[in-house]
Image (spheres, grey):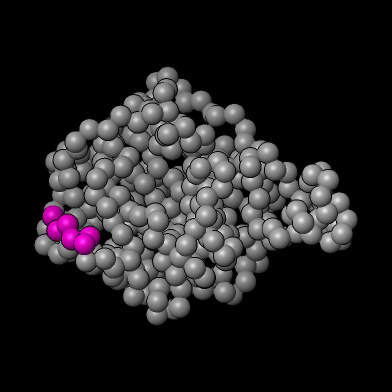
């Protein structure tokens, strides 16, 4: 599916040949995808200088996992604070740089250079063969969109997902940005999604089951008649990009692991205007809503503390620094 080109500014009539060159009538080919995000061309994978420390998949594309402690040592936590700040800064700067008329590949190139300037490796780069330094997910793309030749359109909502590997640990964060003149319903979606993320973060309390996070997120989404994607979840993080902690963004009593001080994991709900169900593109990475309606996401890397939570990718300089009601 990655070979699809972008439609022309003036579309054919229903019975005319499709613009893609398939030879089929437009109504039988691409008409049903009008207004949808289409895949573009993906440029070659960018390189990282030899002097930058890299994770174990950087050369092979195949991560090697080990049994990492769920509760981190003070020394690992301190390194994760730094990685979180680096990731947060890269996300904010890339979001400020991104504009209507750019390709998502141009945005990826800018972010890639920001990683290198800070001595960080882009964690997604070659992770299970993912070809780019960030994920760029527009409109109905739920997550894991691959930066490519698609041009950002006026009215798009764009999620950028940044993960920085520095000091032997990862910091993972994302946010959804408005591109140009965005319609009120999409603005409400992004607002509710950011609020739901922070509702989930505020539910992080030591001694409580991790399902409290999903309950808080789902309750907020349902109150606004929005859906919560179930297929993609938050995860443990530390010296590995993903560890065995699972953070559901909806309530399930079986998600009963008790939160303990020193645990680190992400909270990253994907909220939709329609169904929570998804479809996958042929690239095996890009997930889109099954009904084509828009979706938004925010993400933070969180540390369970003795009395609550520390947001390692939040605070000053972050795209979503604190809960909206605390600003």
Residue found 39% across the figure and 21% down from its top: 51
Q: Where is residue 285 in the image (x, y as percent from the top left)?
A: 50, 44
Tell me the magenta residue range.
254-260
Res. 314 in view: no
At 56% from the left and 60% from the top, the residue drawn is 140
| Quadrant of image for the N terminus | top right
Q: Does the magenta stretch include residue 201?
A: no
Query: Which quadrant, please, contains the C terminus?
Result: bottom left
Q: In this view, does 275 lie above or below 68?
A: below
Seen from the viewer's position, the closer of residues 159 and 258 is 258
Q: Which residue is drawn at 44% across and 78% down?
A: 224
Q: Measuring 41% from the left and 66% from the top, which residue is drawn there? A: 228
The answer to whether 88 appears left or right of 73 in the picture is: right
Whether residue 34 appears in this view of the structure is: yes
Report the number of discs: 0
Classify 196 as above or below 265.
Answer: below
Residue 325 pos. (x, y %): 36, 74
Q: Main secondary structure of the magenta part?
A: loop
Rendered position, 157 above or below 284: below
Q: Which of 156 and 315 is in front in this view?
A: 156
Closer to us: 277 or 82:
277
């Amino acid at each position: 599916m990655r070979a699809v080109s972008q439609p022309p500014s003036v579309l054919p009539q229903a019975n005319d040949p499709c613009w893609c060159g398939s030879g089929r009538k437009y109504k039988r080919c691409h008409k049903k995808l009008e207004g949808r995000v289409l895949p573009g061309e993906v440029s070659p994978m960018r390189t990282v200088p030899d002097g930058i420390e890299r994770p174990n998949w950087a050369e092979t594309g195949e991560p090697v996992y080990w049994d990492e402690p769920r509760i981190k040592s003070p020394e690992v936590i301190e390194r994760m604070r730094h990685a979180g700040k680096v990731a947060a800064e890269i996300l904010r700067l890339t979001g400020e740089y991104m504009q209507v008329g750019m390709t998502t590949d141009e945005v990826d190139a800018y972010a890639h250079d920001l990683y290198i300037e800070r001595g960080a490796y882009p964690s997604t780069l070659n992770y299970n063969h993912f070809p780019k330094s960030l994920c760029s997910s527009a409109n109905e793309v739920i997550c894991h969109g691959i930066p490519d030749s698609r041009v950002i359109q006026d009215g798009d909502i764009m999620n950028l997902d940044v993960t920085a590997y520095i000091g032997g640990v990862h910091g993972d964060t994302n946010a959804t940005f408005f591109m140009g003149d965005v319609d009120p319903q999409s603005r409400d979606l992004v607002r509710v999604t950011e609020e739901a993320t922070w509702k989930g973060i505020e539910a992080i309390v030591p001694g409580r089951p991790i399902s409290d996070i999903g309950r808080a997120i789902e309750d907020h989404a349902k109150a606004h008649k929005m859906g919560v994607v179930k297929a993609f979840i938050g995860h443990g993080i530390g010296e590995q990009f993903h560890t065995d902690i699972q953070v559901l963004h909806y309530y399930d009593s079986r998600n009963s692991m008790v939160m303990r001080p020193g645990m680190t994991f992400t909270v990253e709900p994907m909220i939709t205007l329609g169904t929570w169900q998804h479809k996958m593109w042929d690239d095996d990475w890009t997930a889109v809503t099954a009904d084509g309606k828009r979706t938004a996401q925010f993400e933070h890397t969180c540390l369970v503390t003795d009395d609550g939570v520390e947001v390692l990718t939040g605070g000053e300089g972050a795209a979503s620094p604190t809960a909206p009601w605390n600003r």
